[in-house]
Amino acid sequence: MKDNFLNSAAGSFVMDMYNASDAIYISMALSIVYSVIFIYLMSWFAEVIAWCCIVLVQIGLIGMSAACFMARKLSIDEVKKTQADKN
């Protein structure tokens, strides 16, 4: 009965989980360690990260404004060209 279970799809899954249990336990422990490190880094560099976000958002807003202005200008030029071709 044990051999039939281990050769089935469910038994194969259980054996894979058993064989990988060490890696799973190590991953869970490291996730806690990485979370604590991330929390400390966020507390130490929160102001720097906030200013970086502010600067990047401002650059994005200026860049999108310039892109929209250029798209508008190209659209106006295209409409003028189309109207000139009709006349």
Image (cartoon, helix red, strand yellow):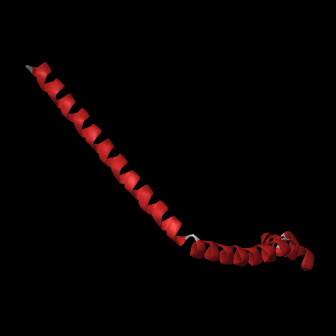
Q: Position of residue 71 (x, y in %)?
A: 28, 38
Q: Residue at x 23, y 35 (%)?
A: 73
Q: Position of residue 81 (x, y in %)?
A: 17, 24
Q: Position of residue 14 (x, y in %)?
A: 81, 75
User: Residue lying furthest left in this view?
Assistant: 87
- 63 relative position to 76: left or right: right
Residue 14 seen in the current view: no
* Of residues 53 and 87, the one drawn nearer to the viewer in this rendering: 53
* Of residues 31 and 45, the one drawn nearer to the viewer in this rendering: 45
Q: Residue at x 52, y 65 (%)?
A: 49
Residue 47 seen in the current view: yes
- 11 relative position to 68: left or right: right
Which quadrant: the C terminus? Answer: top left
Q: Residue at x 58, y 73 (%)?
A: 42
Which quadrant: the N terminus? Answer: bottom right
Labels in figure, total: 0
User: Does 37 appear above or below 82?
Assistant: below
Q: Position of residue 82 (x, y in %)?
A: 16, 25
User: Does 15 appear above or below 54?
Assistant: below
- 28 relative position to 84: left or right: right
Q: Residue at x 85, y 74 (%)?
A: 22
User: Does 43 appear above or below 86?
Assistant: below
- 4 relative position to 50: left or right: right
Q: Quadrant of residue 85?
A: top left
* Of residues 71 and 3, the one drawn nearer to the viewer in this rendering: 71
